[in-house]
Image (tube, rainbow, N blue to C red):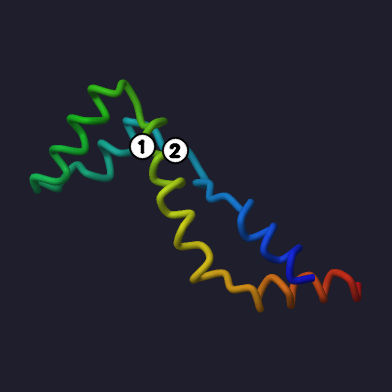
Amino acid sequence: MKELVAYLLDNMYLDFQGEVSIDTVRQLLRGDESREAKALLSKLIADKGVEDLLITLADCLKDNLRSGITENTVREQLSLYSDS
C-alpha cells in the first residue's frame, strides 16, 4: 500500500479548469497597473499565448501537491474505494 500511495503521489498532476486564454488574463489584469502584471502580459504576448505559462505553473506547483494532499489522505481514499 505504501508503494502504491507513493506512486500515485509522484504521478499526480495539476490542471486548470475553465478557459484560460490571453484574453482571459487581460480581463483579469485589466485594472492592475503593477510592474508584475505588465511584465506578465508582455511575456504572454511574446510567447503568443498562455500555454507555456500554464504548463510551467502546473509543473512548479506539482511540488506543493504533496504537502496539501498527504499520504494519509490518499490512503484513506484508497481504503474507502476498496470498501465500496
How dense is the environment of label 1, judged by Cα within 10 Å: few (below 14), some, or many (20 and up)? some
- State the image quarter where residue 78 is shown: bottom right
Residue at left offset 73%, top offset 74%: 75
Considering depth in this image, is 28 or 45 the residue closer to the camera?
45
Which residue is painted at 17% across and 44% down in the image? Answer: 37
Q: Which residue is located at x 59 percent, y 73 percent?
A: 70
**What is the tally of numbered marks visible in this picture?**
2
The quarter in which the N terminus is drawn is bottom right
Q: Amino acid at mark 2?
A: Ile
Q: Indicate the position of residue 50 as horizontal and vertical percent values.
A: 36, 32
Helix, strand, or loop for circle 2? Answer: helix
The quadrant in which the C terminus is found is bottom right
Q: How far across and how far down the image is residue 81, in percent?
A: 84, 69
Q: Are marks 1 and 2 in contact (CB under 8 Å)?
A: yes
The residue carrying mark 1 is 53
Task: Return the mark for residue 64.
Answer: none
Q: Furthest residue to the front?
A: 3
Q: Residue at x 45, y 62 (%)?
A: 64
Left or right of 59 in this view: 74: right
Amino acid marked by disc 1: Leu
Task: Specify whether 54 is left or right of 42.
Answer: right
**Which residue bears the numbered disc 2?**
55
